Amino acid sequence: MKDITTKITAPILLACISLTGCTSTKPVTQIHNQPSEGNRLLIDGFEEENFWYTSKSREDNSLSTEITDEWSTEKDNCGMWTFSRIPDGKQASFSCSSLSFSDWSNAKCLTCDINNMTKGSLEICLEIESGVANEKTRTGYVTLGRGENTNVYFDLQMYKPCDSEEIKKITFIIRGENSGGRIYMDNICLFR
């Protein structure tokens, strides 16, 4: 009887071990898209003032925004956005309502360079507030690997703002359970 139990439980145990071994996650690779084609309009290169702010909501985990010369992909500076631990189902958001121009008609996409300094991958999307009624449109989430992610692409044809001639505010929203940290943001560009 002992031999039969050993023969039956050993294959089951090996199967369980192999199944749990398959659950390890591979690191998310960094994004390095080719530059978009079309008329490039710089939204923010972070070379002058800091026009970005964090949410005042208790539900939001954003902490601070500032300009730094610790990293950049063009010229000297970038934005440094810091956030606390983001539990599952929560977010950190960083907004700007002092846009260099508000007419985004015929826009194809918005791109930016992001250096993810956290311990793992992040998901980020773009939320656009437009029109008299301040209607919000949100793009799909993009997964960022650790380190430099260049020409991160947010589709504005599939996720077209309600009133593209009167953009009032843009917000980058970060989600994904993580221990917090910071990202560097540079070269936020609109392409038509």
Image: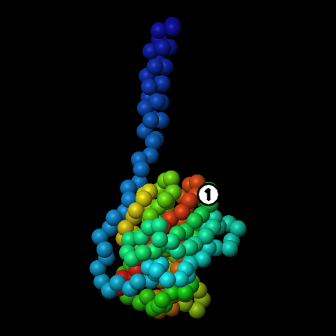
* Location of residue 151 by image quarter: bottom left
Residue 71's x, y, as percent? Answer: 44, 67
Element class at badge 1:
loop
Position of 109 compared to 184: left or right? Answer: left
Position of 113 compared to 61: left or right? Answer: left
Residue at 55 percent across and 80 percent down: it is: 50
Name of the residue lying farthest toward the right: 58
Residue at 38 percent across and 71 percent down: it is: 73
Type of amino acid at the residue the image marks with label 1: Arg
Q: Is residue 163 visible?
A: no
Residue 70's x, y, as percent? Answer: 47, 67
Foreground of the two, 96 or 21? 96
* Location of residue 115 by image quarter: bottom left
Residue 92's x, y, as percent? Answer: 59, 66
Identify the residue under disc 1.
Answer: 85
- The local crowd at label 1, few if under 14, some if 14 to 19, many if 20 or more residues have their Cα within 10 Å, is some
Residue at 32 percent across and 86 percent down: it is: 39
Residue 187's x, y, as percent? Answer: 41, 76
Tell me which colouring the rendered structure shows.
rainbow
Q: Is residue 18 visible?
A: yes
Q: In which quadrant of the rendered image does the C terminus lie? A: bottom left
Residue at 55 percent across and 68 percent down: it is: 81
* Location of residue 148 by image quarter: bottom left
| 65 vs 49: above or below | above
